[in-house]
Amino acid sequence: MARIVMKFGGTSVGNTDRIKNVARRVKAEVDAGNEVAVVVSAMSGTTNQLVTWTNEIARLHDAREYDVVVASGEQVTVGLLALALQDIGVNARSWLGWQIPFRTDGIHGKARIGEIDTTVMRERFAPTGDRGGQVAVVAGFQGIGPDNRITTLGRGGSDTSAVALAAALDADRCDIYTDVDGVYTTDPRITAKARKIDRITYEEMLELASQGAKVLQTRSVAMAMQHGVRVQVLSSFEDKPGTLVVDEGEIVEQQVVTGIAYSPDEAKVTLVGVPDRPGVAGAIFGSLADSAVNVDMIVQNVSQDGKSTDLTFTVGATDLDRAHQVLDGLKGELGFTDIVSDPGVCKISVVGVGMRSQPGVAKTMFQTLAEKGINIQVISTSEIKVSVLISADYTELAVRALHTAYGLDAEGDG
Ligand code: ADP
Ligand code: ASP
Ligand code: MG
């Protein structure tokens, strides 16, 4: 017997037939003698619709009310899945975030999970009388903040709900069921030559997720790494093994580049004529941070005349308006001459732990892009990653060319 957490994403619970399919998968694990908690997302498209509605009412909205609205999609799917399970003879009940509770901090819209009380859930796993143990059907993406109000965990947050629950329950496995049958060398929607990876390290998965591979939410990977949760990504529609996220020691043959991620949700900002004196960068990035604008890549040119220079950096596309607001306020005080922004950019990242010991990865990237006539606007690197910022128009071309250049293409495909 094992204790497992199964998580089903939006497409997997996209209609009532699919919810019945999920119920059958859950029943199979229960029949095999396992204790099961299931975490579900809202039906695909639902959360997008809810976000659109909040924006239509007010663009700069009260984040607490935003959370009340966007958390509602998961309430529907937990109820429906509990009903589908009961209908096929499985003892099941639904749980909303506040009922368990999933305690979070108070950052509405991007809350972090603190503590999860699993006492009652654990008690109910045990069979009583003539009834089998109870399956917990848990709403992903939501919790309750210190102000006793509903919080949500950021888009894609059900993955994090599942991993956090697996950690709190000391589960043997956390199986993330989705609409692809594992983690691929790049988004299979961008190239048919993407290849499924059998095992990937926590570190690589963390980099790929944070650089845009949305198959797992970044925080879910960080949490799995921290608590040693055994995560598997697999298909809810096909019966075949997926991808295991594991420690580096469990990987036998290490590629130099394991995967390629892209993030189109970036915007580039250039401040022209920034005075070249101590404290200016601190003032600019300090003010952006105070306004919760995340800055990613940064380049500052060497000053030609010792007086002023240009400063370029990237922010999330959704933060661009706020960044402009902050920078406009600083322009007079700091004395830079202009703010130029470009939302039409995309960040492409190649990731692999093998880079630590193998030189030349960046060179291959730059040469490959040059051969395709793609201009690199900004570069950043870490120990296991090289990222470049390019025009969004070339995203697919760049990903496909790099996929081939690093020898990642699946054999036998066109
Ligand atoms: P769910 O609703 O199940 O959480 P998501 O849409 O959040 O599913 O994540 C699955 C999607 O992630 C896939 O359909 C795929 O297009 C995308 N994706 C991006 N990068 C990768 C990758 N490297 N491997 C697999 N899927 C990826
Ligand atoms: N339903 C939420 C979203 O669309 C959470 C999730 O799918 O993980 O972001
Ligand atoms: Mg997801």
Image (spheres, rainbow, N blue to C red):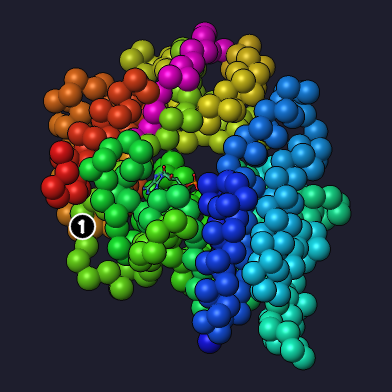
Badge 1 element: loop
Magenta region's main secondary structure?
strand
Q: Is residue 168 left or right of residue 359?
A: right
Q: Is residue 129 above or below residue 17?
A: below
Q: Position of residue 285 (x, y in %)?
A: 56, 31
**Quick check: can you spot residue 389?**
yes
Name the kind of residue labelled 1 in the image: Gln
Within 10 Å of the Cα at label 1, are there few (<14), some (14-19), or many (20+) other Cα atoms?
some
Q: Is residue 325 above or below residue 27?
A: above
The number of callouts visible is 1
User: Label 1: which residue?
Assistant: 255
Q: Is residue 141 above or below residue 173?
A: above
Hey, which quadrant is residue 124 in on the image? bottom right
Tell me, yes or no, whether the highlighted magenta stretch contains residue 125: no
Q: Position of residue 98 (x, y in %)?
A: 80, 59
Q: Residue at x 47, y 36 (%)?
A: 296
Q: Position of residue 409 (x, y in %)?
A: 19, 45
Which portion, as a residue range, is magenta? 335-348
Q: Is residue 277 left or right of residue 107?
A: left
Camera-nearest residue between 109 and 357: 109
